[in-house]
Amino acid sequence: MTERTLILAFESSCDETSVAVIEDGHKILSNIVATQIDSHQRFGGVVPEVASRHHIEQITKCTNEALAQAGVSYNDITAVAVTYGPGLVGSLLIGVTAAKTIAWAHGLPLVPVNHMAGHIYAARFVDEFKYPQMALLVSGGHTELVYMPTEHEYQIIGETRDDAAGEAYDKIGRVLGVNYPAGKTIDEWAAKGEDSFHFPRAMEKEANYDFSFSGLKSAFINTVHNADQRGEELNKEDLAASFQQSVVDVLAEKTMRALDRYPVKQLILAGGVAANHGLRARLDHDMAKFHPEVTMLQAPLKLCGDNAAMIGAAGYVNYRHGDRAGLDLNAVPGLMFDRMKI
């Protein structure tokens, strides 16, 4: 009988404290997530100092619960994996410190994991990965197209130059009076509205794979403020639909063109905004029409947000490839994949 590989994984890059136990990179034995949304809603976004304090309060509880739910002890664990970037430096340090402490105390290998690689590997719980593949990562702080020629190799071919898609959702959500995080509500409103405002599609036709959502955000806010000054009430569902249609059009257009240039076997859709039903539906349509030969794997809805299960899946791959960190491992808030020269 082949010995199983158990990864104890930690994720604390932003406002979720999460600890998981993952078997052989694709089986979730436990995935404990302590969210902080209620604490940050009154501020309209994540407050780093508040987030760090919550992580300190929750990290030990989550660890104990993850081990108990998985029915394992530290003696059963093969390695400890942890997000060390990108993210909020104070939040990252809580997870990194906890992981280093456990690895040292129990003589376990410490495996560093890029948070964005974790998002990609959330889709590994759906099906086995095949290479080469392309990943469209759409989260609160990042919008990236990542080409993976082989396992454990990540090359950015396109990224946001300003606001990420998730940031834009939250910023226009404040204008509409939607609590943070705004993405789910905007998505629900958009399904009931029409694209009647025709907001700009920034960089949609440019000969690159980069994104920009700052201009869209500004156009949206200006439209709402101008209407307020005239005493005119705009339909929130149409506003949401128009905003979302612009975001989805650009994401889909750039992704299809990337697939034209880089033949792959799979397209991975992951990140917090990957839970958006409008985006999922559009990519389903475009993939069937333009790239039926490519299989699309969408991260499960419950794993689109930050969680340790995805870090455990990516950590398993890193562990197999010999990635190890010493007790001097530090948080790297600006950690990025390498940019491919196009």
Image: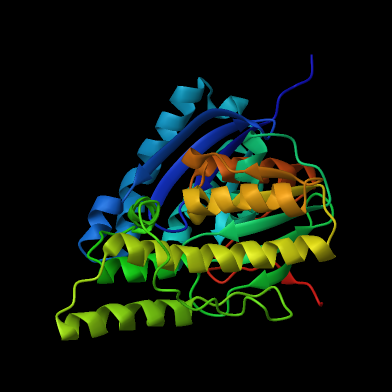
**Residue at x-position 75% and y-position 66%:** 257
Query: Does residue 89 appear in this view?
Result: yes
Between residues 153 and 328, which one lies in front from this camera angle?
Answer: 153
Q: Is residue 314 left or right of residue 106?
A: right
x, y (%) of residue 271?
54, 53
Between residues 75 and 307, which one lies in front from this camera angle?
Answer: 307
**Residue at x-position 40% and y-position 37%:** 62
Give the residue furthest to the left: 231
x, y (%) of residue 320?
78, 42
Between residues 22 and 141, which one lies in front from this camera angle?
Answer: 141
Is the residue 328 above or below the residue 270 in the image?
below
Of the 4 image quadrants, the one containing the N terminus is top right
**Residue at x-position 66% and y-position 32%:** 26
Q: Is residue 134 left or right of residue 165?
A: right
x, y (%) of residue 258?
75, 65
Q: Looking at the image, what colour scheme do you see?
A: rainbow
Between residues 167 and 202, which one lies in front from this camera angle?
Answer: 202
Q: Is residue 316 left or right of residue 165?
A: right
Q: Image quarter for residue 195?
A: bottom left
x, y (%) of residue 228?
19, 80
**Residue at x-position 76% and y-position 47%:** 266
Query: Does residue 276 appear in this view?
Result: no
Is the residue 17 above or below the residue 210 in the image?
above
Of the 4 image quadrants, the one containing the C terminus is bottom right
Is the residue 280 above or below the residue 246 in the image?
above
